[in-house]
Amino acid sequence: MTDAARAAELAARGSYGRLLALLSSRTHDIALAEDALAEAFARALSHWPAHGIPDNPDAWLLTTARNRLTDSQRRQFRFPTVNEIPDMPSSELADGSIPDRRLSLLMVCAHPAIAQDLHVPLMLQTVLGLEAKTIARLFLISPVALSKRLVRTKAKIRDAGIPFALPCDDALRERSTAILEALYALHAHDWLDPAENLGDEAFYLADLLGRLIVDNAEALGLAALIAFSHARARARIVDDMLVPTDEQDVTLWNDALIRYGKRQLHCAYEKSSVGRFQIEAAIESVHIARKETGSTDWLALNKLYVALLKIAPSVGSLVAQAVVTGRLHGPQAGLEALDAAETVTGSGYQPLWAARADLQARAGNHLAAAKSYDKAISLATDGPTINLLARKRAQELNK
């Protein structure tokens, strides 16, 4: 990859949402802004190799995209002259900075005039940069059907003139629920690949939302959850192999992010409004505590998973609690809990087979564990996880 292509890729990863928010806030036409930004990136790939990478790539891309919008709007007679298009104050580009308007675009995506089941997918695509096919896979729906619905929704935003601005306090609180769900999905989407910087975007926006809506305990909880997860990023994958949380090298954990997470979680608890993200952050904090205590408090984890399953039951939580049960009451009790969980998760859930293999190994049933690892490997989709499972399978076969 050339330096110019690499610079364009970095700008796309780090700035796409901010640039799109700036462009669409002026046109109220998300699809038109997306087209203009795509053309700006295409021009960068041809212009930068010949003329050099600009000192401020984001500003270059924004200017190019805005010029593209001007041409398009002039052709469509939406704006008679370029002088009638509100210009960006020079201060907005000073010192290489671009103001963050993604939050207002997130609010647009969560507008009550938009179908509720499209709030999160629309945010993930327009503001947070995920492709429609990726979003469709996350929500187990047809990529073609989702793409068509997203196109129609963007047209509705344009035609209805939905304002690109922060709503009143009550509406802000109401829409924040969908926004937090989108940020959580972004954080969880590709956490094994720090190079994507998706978690960084989720962390930044969750922190921003927590400061904007000061009484939203769940925003604080989500910021804490992402911070705790980020704190372990350097220890999560070693030599292209996933490292289980209770086996990670705690000296690689980020103390600054841990302190931040603890502060946010404490502030959330003070608001006496416990929710899903706060409980998940508390689960992370129990694992984080191993850095100080040297051991994992499995009893505390069990209580938290019981609470989480009451508030927000999920297949992941069911399997995780079965694993905790195995640590507290022995592998056979854990396997029985997994059998019960399988009636809910089905037999195609990869973490269930990885957990079953681990419990079978702890019970001394090495051949059964190896077979379960085979099944888990067949269902895994990323290299680090496959490498971990393959190593454990080989260990069981050698016993």
Image (cartoon, rainbow, N blue to C red):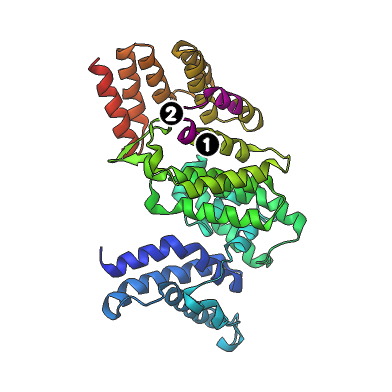
Of 242 and 42, nearer the camera is 242
Q: Which residue is under mark 1?
A: 284
Q: Which residue is under mark 2?
A: 351
Residue pictured at 29% horizontal, 34% vertical? 387
| Span highlighted in magenta in the image | 289-305
Q: Position of residue 327 (x, y in %)?
A: 47, 19
Residue pictured at 74% horizontal, 55% vertical? 171
Q: Position of residue 248 (x, y in %)?
A: 38, 35
Regarding residue 360, the answer to whether it shows in the image is yes
Of 33 and 60, nearer the camera is 60
Q: Which tag, 2 or 1, sits closer to the chain's start?
A: 1
* Amino acid on which the number 2 mark rests in the picture: Pro
Q: In the figure, 323 relative to 35: above or below?
A: above
Mark 2, secondary structure of its residue:
helix
- Which mark, residue 20? none
Can residue 154 be found in the magenta stretch? no
Q: Position of residue 298 (x, y in %)?
A: 52, 23
Quadrant showing the N terminus: bottom left
- Number of marks: 2
Magenta: main secondary structure: helix
